[in-house]
Image (cartoon, grey):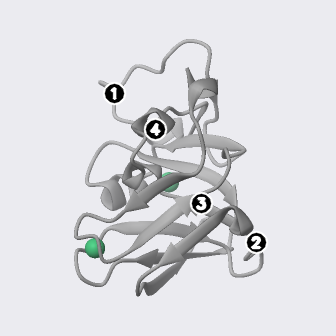
Amino acid sequence: MMDDITYPISGACQCGGVTYELLGPPSMVVACHCRECQKLSTSAFSITAMVSAESVRFRGLMKDWSRVADSGNVSAAKFCPTCGNRIYHYDPNEPDKLKLKPSNLSDTRLIQPTAHVWVSEKQDWFQLPAGVKTFERQP
Ligand SMILES: [Zn+2]
Ligand SMILES: [Zn+2]
């Protein structure tokens, strides 16, 4: 299914103030069930596509926010200042690796996690699908 996806794929925040193009497939799509991601997604988990910085072209003004993650690394975020949609996360020490929020992409088949992390904090009602990698915390 994911093999049928053709690139580039366009993406846009809810208000359209930030748009982008994803030029190639992500290396991995991860669902994170940690409490921070529950807040971020206003849902039970968030989904992230791991991509290289050179594989995305962004347009529009983004604002920054960051916090210190459990690992001690800084988790920096870019978001649309108008509608508040989160666009991507990154570690300032590794600015070439982006954690793109793929729900903003026009081809939503990409929102299909191949791994689930922080399942130690997942909601009880959510059943992990068969055949995906799972990690109790951050791998
Ligand atoms: Zn927006
Ligand atoms: Zn998380």
Q: Are marks 4 and 3 in contact (CB under 8 Å)?
A: no
Question: Which residue type carries mark 3?
Answer: Lys
State which tag comes first along the sequence, 2 or 1.
2
Q: CA distance from mark 4 to mark 2?
A: 22 Å
Q: Which residue is located at x 31 percent, y 59 percent?
A: 39
**Outermost top residue:** 130
Q: Which residue is mark 1?
A: 124
Task: Identify the image quadrant of the C terminus.
Answer: top right
Density class for disc 4 (Cα within 10 Å; few <14, some 14-19, many ≥20) is many
Question: Which residue type carries mark 1?
Answer: Asp
Q: Are marks 4 and 1 in contact (CB under 8 Å)?
A: no
Q: Are marks 1 and 3 in contact (CB under 8 Å)?
A: no
Question: Which residue type carries mark 2?
Answer: Asp
State which tag comes first along the sequence, 4 or 3.
3
Query: Residue 63's x, y, as percent?
Result: 41, 87
Q: Which residue is located at x 30 percent, y 84 percent?
A: 81
Density class for disc 2 (Cα within 10 Å; few <14, some 14-19, many ≥20) is few
In this view, the residue in front, 36 or 103, is 103
Question: Which residue type carries mark 4?
Answer: Ile
State which tag comes first along the sequence, 1 or 3.
3
